[in-house]
Amino acid sequence: MNVNTTYNNPTNLYWNRIKGASYETKLALIAKLSNALMEESRDKKNTPISASSFYGVWNDNEYDETADELINHIRESRSFKNDIQAF
């Protein structure tokens, strides 16, 4: 058993302090922790995405096709679930 992971783990330190707390206190702590997690998640969603984060996503060197050949390849690979029938 590693002493550092068992006794110095922040989760264990917090738990040892609150495990004797009342039911209502534990519920209040759960609510506060949940709200804090939701706020962090909301903050991450509102962080603007910069164009530089997409750098390297599309690599033209992988394809030896001209633009017209690529367009034709895309059109030929399309598949439709239902054929449209004329009335």
Image (cartoon, helix red, strand yellow):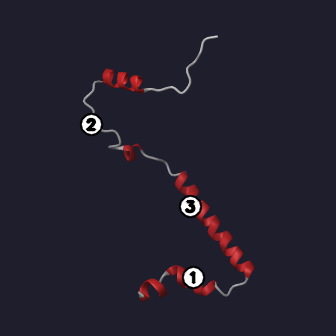
Disc 1, SS = helix
| Crowd band around label 2 with a 10 angstrom C-alpha radius: few (<14), some (14–19), many (20+) | few
Q: On the rendered structure, is 8 left or right of 23? A: left
Mark found first going from the N terminus, 3 or 2? 3
Using the image, tell me which numbered label, if any, was put on residue 14: 1
Identify the residue at image location x=68%, y=69%: 31
Using the image, tell me which numbered label, if any, was put on residue 70: none
Q: Is residue 20 above or below residue 36?
A: below
| Crowd band around label 1 with a 10 angstrom C-alpha radius: few (<14), some (14–19), many (20+) | few
Residues at marks 1 and 2, CA–CA distance in whole angstroms: 52 Å
Mark found first going from the N terminus, 1 or 3? 1
> Label 3 belongs to which residue?
40
Q: Amino acid at mark 2?
A: Glu
Given residues 10 and 47, the one toward you in this image is 10
Q: Amino acid at mark 1?
A: Tyr
Image mark count: 3
> Label 2 belongs to which residue?
62
Disc 3, SS = helix
Given residues 48 and 45, the one toward you in this image is 45
Identify the residue at image location x=57%, y=82%: 14
Residues at marks 1 and 3, CA–CA distance in whole angstroms: 20 Å
Q: Is residue 69 above or below residue 54?
A: above
Q: Is residue 62 above or below residue 41?
A: above
Q: Amino acid at mark 3?
A: Glu
Image quarter of the N terminus = bottom left
Residues at marks 3 and 2, CA–CA distance in whole angstroms: 38 Å
> Residue 34: image x %, image y %?
63, 66
Q: Quadrant of residue 51?
A: top left
Question: Looking at the image, is mark 3 or mark 2 nearer the viewer?
Answer: 2
Question: Looking at the image, is mark 1 or mark 2 nearer the viewer?
Answer: 2
Callouts 1 and 2 close, C-beta under 8 Å: no
